[in-house]
Amino acid sequence: MTDCIFCKIINGEFNTEFVYENEYVVVFKDIHPKAPVHLLVVPKVHVESLNELEDKNLMGELLMAVKAVTKKIGLNAYKLHVNTGKAAGQEVMHLHIHILGNM
Ligand code: AMP
């Protein structure tokens, strides 16, 4: 999607460093961290929010990416946060999972 900031990040337009990447997802640091570790797990395809996610395989891939990236950085205690819908505080309308941890 052309006007989506996360699509632009995925397309490399901001040279954002990916902490983890595979065929389905990228993971990068939140620009305004709310915890010592604050990562965003983002599907490469544009899906607005959890409400629009129909692909069960992608749903699994998102959580498997959480496991992979937390293992990679040695974070074994963390919280996941998924703001869904503008009324719940979702600012970027491209599905993402926040990983919040202390390290
Ligand atoms: P949400 O409120 O769940 O939509 O969260 C969006 C998150 O994206 C916020 O925590 C922002 O700090 C983060 N964010 C916005 N733009 C960028 C960016 N260019 N790079 C990294 N994180 C971003």
Image: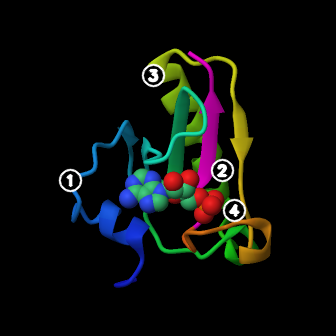
Question: Could you tell me if residue 92 is visible in this image?
Answer: yes
- Please provide percent x and percent y for residue 69: 49, 31
Q: Residue at x 57, y 19 (%)?
A: 75
User: Nearer the viewer's eye, disc 1 or disc 3?
Assistant: 1
Query: Which residue appears at 55% of the width and 69% of the height?
Result: 92
Quickly name the residue at label 3.
Answer: 72
- Disc ID at residue 56: 4
Whole-angstrom CA distance, mark 2 to mark 4, is 6 Å
Question: Of the residues tagged 4 and 3, which is closer to the observer?
Answer: 3
Residue 84 % position (x, y): 74, 67
Q: Is mark 1 on a helix, strand or loop?
A: loop
Residue under the image location 79 percent in, 67 percent down? 88
Q: For mark 2, what is the residue?
A: 60
Q: Is disc 3 placed on a helix, strand or loop? A: helix
How does the figure colour the protein chain or chains?
Answer: rainbow
Q: Residue at x 54, y 37 (%)?
A: 38
In magenta stretch: residue 67 = no
What residue does disc 1 label?
A: 15
Q: Nearer the viewer, mark 2 or mark 3?
A: 3
Give the magenta range: 95-103
Q: Is residue 97 magenta?
A: yes
Pick whichever of labels 2 and 3 is earlier in the sequence. 2
Determine whether the beta carbon of the residue marked 3 sits less than 8 angstroms from the nearest atom of ligand 1. no
Tell me where residue 13 sits by quadrant: bottom left
Between the C-alphas of marks 2 and 3, the distance is: 18 Å
